[in-house]
Every structure is written in C-alpha cells, then in structure tokens.
Amino acid sequence: TSASLFILLAEDNAISARLAQKFLSRLGHEATLAKNGREVLEALPKGRFDLILMDVEMPDMDGLEATRRIRAGEAGQRYRRAPIVAMTAHALAEFKEKCEQAGMNDFVTKPVDFYDLNVILERNRPAAPTPDIKDRAPIPAEAVEDATLNRQEALLRVGGDEDLLKELRTAFLNELPDQISRLDNAVRQEHFDQIMELAETMAGTCRTVGAVACSLSAAELESAARKADGERTRKAWVHLDEDLNQLLRRLREAGTV
C-alpha cells in the first residue's frame, strides 16, 4: 500500500468536511481541517503537509485567492509548489481554467466520490505514478433505486460504508430545518447571491445522501437565482421545498432518526 499523506483539507461545509475526512482516513491519510483560505495560510507554516485539498467556494477568503497567495510564497517557500487539488461543485471547463490559472494542480467535483478522490490523490502524490482506478466496493443487494432517496447512488459515493451513510443522513436531517429557513428568507427578499450559494451547497449535500430529486431541484433554483429571475426563482423554491419535505418523510421512514 502507498504511504500515508498528510493533507490540509480546506472545507467550510460541515457535512462535506466530515465526508472528506472519513474518506481520507479510510484511505490511510491524515487530514487537518481549515474552514477558509485564511486558516489555510495560517496552518501551512505550522505543519508538514504533502497535499492541499482546497474547496473553491469558502467565506472570508476563497480557495482561488488562497492558492494564489500560496504560490506567491505567503505560506513559506516549501509550499510554493505543493500539490493543490480544487474541490468545487462547478464542473464547467471555464471554471477548471480559473483553478489552473490560480495555480491549482488538479480538480475534483463535489460532492466528492470516494473512488475518484483516491485516484486524484494518488495522481498528485509527490513523485508518484498514476494508479489504475480501483474496483468499486460491492453494493448490498437490498439497495433500492429511488429518485427521492437513492440508496445505491449514496452507497457508491461513500465506498459502500453503511455506517457513514447513516451518519451523514442524520447530520443532513439535523441541519435541514435551518437550511430551509435560510433559503426561504433569501427567496422572499430576492437575495440572489445568497440563494445561489445556499442552493449550490444544498444540491451537493442532497446528492451525497442520495436525494437525487432534491439535488436536481436545488440545481434548478441555483440556475434561476444566477439569472436573477424572481418568478422562476420563486417557482423553483416551491418545487425544492416540496421535494425536501417528501425527503424528510422518507428519511424518517428509513429510520435515520
């Protein structure tokens, strides 16, 4: 097996951070968490890190700005060429270009998939060859496909780890009322930037727990808000709110809480 990597994980979303930390631990790596770009710049000189996993959208200082500063030597000379892997919900070609221009080495799409992450880490391991993609873990036979709660897709994302999936779904349920309230307020006040940010996070988190319909509805809300279309945004929020309430019922039936 490959040697452990010491990874600085920059991620402000609690569920995404928990998922990534669990993945990294299962792959035999050690992760230190930073919640924004400033914390990254503070943490690097104090530790020994082989690689930085950098969420692009973070408060206070985003991943692009933090990367530019690392490349400029603000975190010390030894990190100027450290591997930096971008994590973002944007899979767009122009966004990848932005990441490359900032000095990032590679790119992983959120919500992060256990198997993709392993390949990308190995590809960016200092002075290491690219490995083959590992076989996916077997999915239990009782995994049922469903647009409201797709257990099979969720299990694939977490490498077949039943306990982790249950933990993530419970965390998601606990955070959901606050997320719904914040989105509702943002839609009422037509704060389109805030709607975009909240909906994008919601889309990724929903996909992580296997809530496919909610993820698609959240992506539609994010798209409407991006165009600052008030009527389309309100309609998209009504659909997402309905999907989320259906999801809540299904999660409770599934015995997550």
Image (cartoon, grey):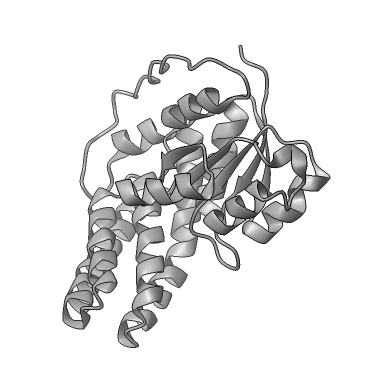
Furthest-top residue in view? Answer: 1
Percent of width and height locating residue 184? 35, 79
Pick the residue in front: 251 or 16: 16
Pick the residue in front: 187 or 76: 76
Residue shown at 50%/38% (left/top)? 164
Quadrant for the N terminus in the image: top right
Please give left or right for residue 37 compared with residue 183 in the image.
Answer: right
Percent of width and height locating residue 80? 68, 41
Residue shown at 36%/73% (left/top)? 195
Residue 159 visible in the displayed image: no
Residue 139 visible in the displayed image: yes
The answer to whether residue 225 is above or below residue 71 is: below
Furthest-right residue in view? Answer: 46
Q: How many marks?
A: 0
Percent of width and height locating residue 12? 57, 58
Residue shown at 22%/37% (left/top)? 145
Please give left or right for residue 195 compared with residue 147 in the image.
Answer: right
Percent of width and height locating residue 75? 74, 49
The answer to whether residue 228 is above or below residue 135 is: below
Residue shown at 56%/66% (left/top)? 59
Please give left or right for residue 160 compared with residue 150 in the image.
Answer: right
- The quarter of the picture where residue 187 lies is bottom left
Pick the residue in front: 20 or 9: 9
